[in-house]
Image (cartoon, rainbow, N blue to C red):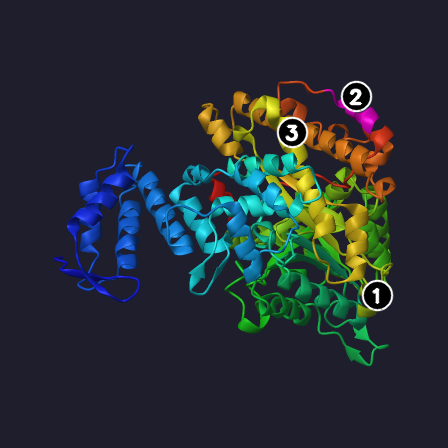
Amino acid sequence: MHLTYVVKKNGEREDFQPEKINQWGEWACSGTTANWSLLITHAIKKMYEGATTSELQRALIDSAVDLIDEDVDYDRVAAKLQLADTRKRAYDNYKPPGLKLFYYHMVEKGLWEDMDYTEEQLEYLDARLDHGRDELFSYAGLKQMCDKYLIRTRDRLYETPQFLYMGMSMAIFRKEPIEDVVKLYNIFSLHKVNVPTPVLVGLRTADKGLASCCLIKSGDSLQSINAAINVAYTMTANRAGIGMEMGIRSEDDPVRGGAFHHLGKLPYYKLIDKTVKANTQQSRGGSATVQFCIFDPEIESLLRLKSQRVSDERRIDKLDYSMAVNDYFIKRFIDDGNISLFSIYNTPDLYELFFSKNIKEFGELYESYERDATIPRRSVSAREVFSTFFKERIDTGRMYAFRADIVNIRSTFKDAIYSSNLCQEITEPTTEFSDVSELYKVDGDGEVALCNLAAIACTRVRVGEYEEVAYLLLKMVDNIIDYQSYPYPAIRTTATNRRNVGIGLINIAYGLASNGYSYESQEGRDYVHRETEKFSFYLHKASVRLAKEKGPCPWFDRTTYSDGTLPIDNYPEFLDTVCSEELFLPWESLRKDIVKYGMRNSVLEAQMPSETSSVVIGST
């Protein structure tokens, strides 16, 4: 394509000057093995007469991306060009403004909240803000940051990554020593830690909906279901993913003394689907995972809700699902036995016992109901149920298994656990609200569980700094619990009393690969053991440190930690055959500190997928 002119941002025509685009290409490819001449040739082929300068810049970026398969260094080229384009769009200049000027501008525009920093403090922080760290991004990471997380309007970009990181640190550590603001900024900007979408989007703005997960339980009454749906609607608008367990009766169960028959769970699941899709979150759509029990009378249709082989009327394929199961039913599967299906309407105590540590008692009650001819039941093949589950899981990838017994046995909570969250990485206590009005009471009669997430990128944290990184990250997430907004007083009460957090460990796959370990090898398993032990130990130590500074969580006595129980006490024994190394950190000393000082948080660890946010920092 032969270009004679281009159109500038202000609409003026300008003669096309090849030397300008050549200079761009040479600059972008400097310090790499990429060929700037080849880059320019590819970009020009994408152009047309009268193209805008912005389109020309985009063509350079796209051409660099196209060439990555030929030479991986073109990723650096694409990232440099993307960064230049980002800064140009935000500041009309490659050089960002100073923090003080930027801060006042963003506050005046209403895009950042006023955090009450003095001019001297802003100058102190500005001297420690390093825009050169923008070059740590891969192209994919920077593009993700620009498209999803940087503050923008329809036609304007307002910030670049280092201001985002500093703004987040300033917002959440405004009451902490200013040196800690810098420390937190450093672990953000050096990509030592990963923070989730709600935090990247909202922290520093007036929007304080920062919880990643919301776990909800409904009862069987219309009022309780209404309360649960209200929470799902509101928390989706606040960017939280929804995990829902509905303890409602099954199809054809009597309603109002048999005046009419219940329509089952599908109408309510459809309502959940519409509810979470009604509010599109700023950088992602609303989503929910709904859980049901393996012995629910509707199990066969519930397992097929995502299937493309059922009618539209019986399909709800935009929701995800989780089947609650325990060891008792796995044994029936192994023995090729049958499963008796009971409705919660007829056997509420059976369902309650199912979500407990008492597998033996559950089995005894279950079998007594099987012998009771007065209780309605239907029998199905255990292998057929599990086969359907496996098939739907393979076909969709979004049919999960919830081990009700294992979850409750290994839980850090003394209260019963009924479900997991959207992505199934954390389990927390929930109880149904009897009515919507209870949500507006400080001491409402139910419990909705929230979780705030973050993660440590294991390979980027040096041995000597691990303890400090774990402490800073946990303190940030713990501060969010007090800082974030709550749509209902009852949710604030349980959130601030439990102080649930979910810190994950990411980049393990890279760590294995960079050390030349296979996951199946003994060296690989021992490596994972060392990393996960270090991760768990320093998180627990950080929570004790925060308990010393700010006090333990008010409901610490409702955790197994209060009895001195640690994760090392209840892991499956077979893991000792998988790993050839002993524990190497001083857990017994930590146990004494936990009993003495308590912990700031009821739960600490959750291995979240970090599917989107991990792209930003280029981690696995």
Dot 1, crowdedness within 10 Å: few (<14), some or many (≥20)? some
| Residue 438 image label | 1
Most common secondary structure along the magenta stretch: helix
**Quadrant placement of the N terminus:** bottom left
Return the disc, 3 or 2, that comes first in the chain's sequence.
3
Q: Are marks 3 and 1 in contact (CB under 8 Å)?
A: no
> Which percent across, then down, holds residue 142?
43, 46
Q: Which residue is mark 2?
A: 589
Dot 3, crowdedness within 10 Å: few (<14), some or many (≥20)? some
**Image vertical order of residue 434 relative to residue 566, above or below:** below
**Image vertical order of residue 554 relative to residue 596, above or below:** below
In the rendered structure, the answer to whether residue 110 lies left or right of residue 94 reads: right
Return the disc, 3 or 1, that comes first in the chain's sequence.
1
Q: Residue at x 75, y 38 (%)?
A: 410
Instruction: Say what secondary structure mark 1 lies in.
Output: helix
What's the amino acid at mark 1?
Glu
Q: Look at the image and tell me whether residue 336 can be seen.
A: no
Return the disc, 2 or 1, that comes first in the chain's sequence.
1
State the extent of the magenta-drawn residues as a range. Answer: 586-593
Q: Which residue is mark 3?
A: 468
The quarter of the displayed image where residue 468 is located: top right
